Amino acid sequence: MNPHLDRLHPYPFEKLRQLFAGVTPNPDHTHISLGIGEPKHPTPAFIQKALTHAVAGLANYPSTHGGDPLRAAIAGWLERRYGVPPLDAATMVLPVNGSREALFAIAHCVIDSSRPGALVLSPNPFYQIYEGAAYLAGAEPYFVNSQPSRNFACDYSSVPADVWERVQLLYLCSPGNPTGAVLSLEDWKELFALSDRYGFVIAADECYSEIYFGAEAPLGALEAAHQLGRSAGPRPYANLVVFSSLSKRSNVPGMRSGFVAGDPDVLKKFLLYRTYSGGAMSPVIQAASIAAWNDEAHVQENRNLYREKFNLITPLLKGVMDVELPDAGFYLWADVRRTGLSDTEFAKGLYAEYNVTVLPGSYLARDAHGTNPGRDRIRMALVAEVDEGLEAANRIVEFCTDLKRN
């Protein structure tokens, strides 16, 4: 068996299951989960219709490269959303079966494990796929802690030069999971300079990009690269690949539809890798994806639902814990030290007494540089409908109020 498998940590939800083992939640309350970031808003009818009208496509083997119409639809969306110059859809866009599998696979394409001490840099806390991809590609993860004083940005200037010299791949998530933080243009300028100096590939995970609360949409990686003069020349978007999906944007997590876009040299190698790994998207899913990427009205409606929830729920929770409206995404990243409980104690007690599930922040991070940046925080995924989200928030307030009384 592959010995790297033994290095994988239990997934956060397996840890949560173990934490809750033997706990019988209060039967007076129906269960509400804020633990898993699975969109619960209805899938738009026009996407369902496009899916069912394309079932004849089941009679054909799909191409790993994806059909021309889908790649053109994705390229068009990127151009409209980020104001970048026209992309060569044949060489700079690759459809994938959800961003998760592609984020995992890119490490196997990029990492040269024959080079001693190969590193994959990751924010901390992080999406656990980044770590697993590093281990199974024969590299070691190196974590850079997010800092509340920097709006949860990572201080990449703190990384020593001898570490950068070993980095082959840098994972980023903007808007971040779980913090919701968005990288600024200055952040990108620093990272591009480091990539140019040390030669690593940047994998930008942007699956939360369409859920935001301000007037301006979050800055994207391709957008930042274009503004910094990196979208033209013999190798546009050098060493930068961007990952996104329809799951959160269009409420279709079950479709497993996303894309990778950016540096054509990296994508050429990634396409070769995927030709062997068998990651082709069904023609049926491609047809529904084209319909989704070409429509923005449903995205605005979805965003409005999240804005309503966050504007109602965040003020309620601020009265009992330290939490702020994030830049973007659908998570609240709350500090629960005011309650006198650790993150795991809080999650276990809330589940037992009020039947609400939240995820301990320490499960989403690793001990690094003397601390676990997720400790004493909880992640709440506000994915349910407004009424259910409000009910969960009110129960959390009651739970915290009970703690004060006792």
Image (tube, rainbow, N blue to C red):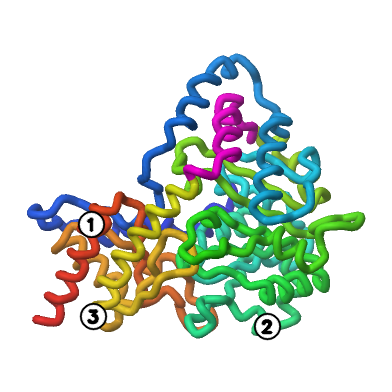
Q: Please give the label number shown on residue 157.
A: 2
* Nearer mark to the viewer, of 2 and 1: 2
Q: Residue 256 placed where, x, y %? A: 52, 39
Q: Please give the label number shown on residue 21.
A: 1
The foreground one among 40 and 80 is 80
- 19 vs 325: above or below: above
The residue where tag 3 is placed is 339
| Badge 1 element | loop
Which region shows up in magenta? 279-298
Residue type at numbered disc 3? Thr
Q: How far apart in space, not on screen, are marks 2 and 1 (Cα)?
A: 42 Å
Query: Which residue is drawn at the image coordinates 58% and 72% (left, top)?
Result: 143
Query: Which residue is drawn at the image coordinates 60% and 30% (left, top)?
Result: 286
Dot 1: few (<14), some (14–19), or many (≥20) neighbours within 10 Å?
A: few
Residue type at numbered disc 2? Ser
In the image, taking residue 193 as reference, residue 303 lies left or right, namely: left
Residue type at numbered disc 1? Ala
The foreground one among 277 and 249 is 249
**Labels 2 and 1: the sequence-earlier one:** 1
The foreground one among 136 and 244 is 244
Q: How far apart in space, not on screen, are marks 2 and 3 (Cα)?
A: 34 Å
Please identify the dominant SS of the magenta region. Answer: helix
